[in-house]
Amino acid sequence: MKIYNTLSRQAEEFEPIEEGKLYFYVCGLTPYDHAHLGHARTYISMDMVKRYFLHKKYDVLHIQNITDIEDKIFNRSRESGKSPQELSEKFHTEALEEFKRLNILPADYYPKVSEHIREIIEMIGKLIENGHAYETETGVYYSVSSFQDYGKLSGQKPEGRRSGARCSIEETKKDPADFALWKKGEDVLIFESPWGKGRPGWHIECSAMSMKYTGGRELDIHGGGRDLAFPHHENEIAQAECALGHRFAKYWMHTGFLTVKGEKMSKSLGNFIVLRDLLDKYPPYALRLFFLHSHYRSPVDYSEENISSSQTTAERMFNFLEHAGELPESGGTENGELRKKLQEETEGFYRAMDNDFDTPTALSHMFGIMTECFSEMRKEEPDYPGIAEAKRDFEKMMWILGLEKEEKKLSPEKEKEIKFLVQKRETARKERNFKLADEIRDELARMGILLEDTEEGPKWKMR
């Protein structure tokens, strides 16, 4: 199994630090606003990685931080009159509900910065003691020049950071490349420290909190969006390795950029897509499959047309499982050629996943399984055991990719309305008013209801 490691800039054979165990850290949200499409891209990709390791029987320890101390939260707090804790709790809870709908497995720990001040202070103290940080009248800063390997992840060296760099009026750091570990002064939320009242800088949190939940062990995989590789992840490495005295993370995985019509998604450009709005328009599995059609490291350009196409494809996959599930698991005529092709497609899926989680190729093998089975189903005496085995393999693949139907519950009022429309359409059909019948079918489709006319009468189900 190979993973592309941003640190080495090449695909490497995966070897866990501890046999059968995976220490997995993913940079989490700064919850000052609603979760957006870029968040979905990163967390769907990282969830796929986690699921594959779980499929391989790894014991996964998954940590995903909550940055609840940050300037954006403080600014929103001042604007709204709500406390930073109240804001971050509201938006993070909302995001987790949306991620649950996207079938993203929850992390084992969601540590908050505000609840780990002691660990952060201890780490800063250790960095000062080791000569990698210093105090001034405005804060405590990490000395980038003290870490010889600075820039090994991103390729950006301190010299590049100094060129054209400016210090803000409030900063008194020795070098423009240095970054804040502790910011002194009054703010919306402040804490006591050996260096006076203040709050942590941004980068220190992930290093301190990941170390707490791994017991200071090295991480197997540290994941996040490509935009975090520099400076955030670069600074994490510098802090952690100087405090730990050993490597911080073995493999670094970064998801590709998300664009909208070729441009970076931003509120100023008017192309900012809030996740909950998109989930009101499309089922979660459509959005999930849309991202899985691209390699996790590749850039993705947002397209509603492609999301709609992914919805159709996913429903065809569910349809295959449904039809295969209605067949007997024994009898028929054994088809050796079919079983050989199905075996090749199944092996192809896992070979693709072992090749740095190549989901586009993995999906092509799933479509191959569907094609072979649908062709076999049309025969008078299909190979029922062969199809049944393919269905079981297909279900495992669907779980690995997190493609499952969303369980929706209708209110009694909504169910009553649907039954009324179904009956109204049936009456229209009997009266040969096909125009009205088609209009009602279209209306039900917009409500997410699929109709099927059978000999026993119309049957309906939710998409």
Image (cartoon, rainbow, N blue to C red):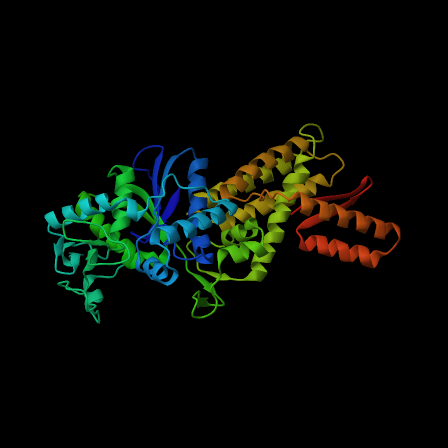
Give the camera-side residue of 206 and 189: 189
Residue 190 in the image, given as x and y percentages of width and height: 24, 53
Residue 121 visible (yes or no): yes
Give the camera-side residue of 327 and 236: 236
Residue 355 visible (yes or no): no
Residue 358 in the image, given as x and y percentages of width and height: 46, 49
Q: Is residue 208 left or right of residue 93?
A: left
Q: Is residue 94 left or right of residue 326?
A: left
Q: Residue furthest top?
A: 330
Give the camera-side residue of 320 and 78: 78
Q: Is residue 410 left or right of residue 226?
A: right
Q: Residue at x 29, y 44 (%)?
A: 115
Is the residue 330 above or below the residue 255 in the image? above
Residue 325 in the image, given as x and y percentages of width and height: 66, 35
Is the residue 429 above or below the residue 60 in the image? below
Q: Residue furthest right?
A: 431
Is the residue 225 above or below the residue 395 in the image? below
Residue 306 in the image, given as x and y percentages of width and height: 57, 59
Give the camera-side residue of 272 and 137: 137
Image-quadrant location for residue 21: top left
Image-quadrant location for residue 230: bottom left
Q: Residue at x 80, y 50 (%)?
A: 424
Q: Residue at x 53, y 37 (%)?
A: 396
Q: Residue furthest front?
A: 81
